[in-house]
Image (cartoon, rainbow, N blue to C red):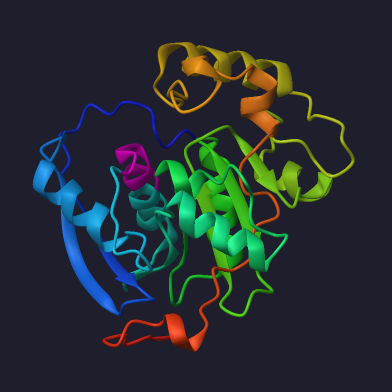
Amino acid sequence: MMLLAPTASAETRTLKIHFVHTGEKAAITFKRNGRYDAKGLKQLNYIVRDWRRNQPTKMDPRLFDLVWEVYQRSGGSGYINVVSGYRSPETNSMLRSRSKGVAKESQHMRGTAMDFYIPGVPLKKLRELGMKAQAGGVGYYPNSGSPFVHMDVAGVRAWPRMSRQELVRLFPDGKTVHIPSDGKPLPGYQQALAEYKKRLSSNQILIADEKSGGGKRKNLLAMLFGGGDEDEEEDVVVPAERPATSRRSRS
């Protein structure tokens, strides 16, 4: 299943977002008749901002497409509860000083990542939908204080890795660039890798990283398996940090 392939339908897409740190809720239309809506994108950028610094950024719109399509396939009907969206370099450094589980080159700083859960939808199902998309990174945190999945539109990778049996169940034809925990690719790996390279070169999935390496694109293996938030922990909040208007919900 490739969620981010171009579609012929001129869809209108709306995301129902609840940002848990501020309590803000909104149903935001970011695509109308197949075209991105500038006002909607700006609203989404703001609601998933770095709330500690009240600082938004330009999020990668493909991330919103990915989350929307996962939501559609999840059977969810409520709000997407966002635990973490944009994270400024300053905030990321602060979080790294508290925990070894925050990546130095976090995708959150690049506006390409979101941590979230959907009430009523099993976290395991969200993880599987994200992995089947093969559109970026998928992190699975079922044991966090507020269990969540991480999804980004950087290199295709997943953590922790699934067992071989789990991955075969998810990809019965073996066509996946995901690697099982035994380190041995499934039979369709080469075919999946060729398709991935094609998408990479066409820029449908990955965008050249202009923020590092002098604007040069990372090598394919680094994009596939390296970097990102593999050890990321929950973006925990200490009481003094909470906004005065916070209405934190666990519905």
Residue visible at 32% across and 77% down in the picture? 22
User: Where does the C terminus fall, quadrant-wise?
Assistant: bottom left
Q: Position of residue 73 (x, y in %)?
A: 41, 54
- Residue 64 on the magenta span: yes
* Towards the viewer: 192 or 50: 50
Question: Would residue 153 appear left or right of 104 to someone viewing this image?
Answer: left
How many numbered marks, from 0 up? 0
Q: Which residues are magenta?
A: 59-66
- Residue 43 on the magenta span: no
Question: Would residue 69 appear left or right of 108 to someone viewing this image?
Answer: left
* Towards the viewer: 205 or 185: 205
Q: Position of residue 150 (x, y in %)?
A: 54, 55
Residue visible at 69% across and 22% down in the picture? 221
Corner quadrant of residue 233? bottom right
Corner quadrant of residue 228? top right
Residue visible at 64% across and 16% down in the picture? 219
**Residue 171 higher or lower than 214, as above or below:** below
Q: Position of residue 159 (x, y in %)?
A: 70, 50
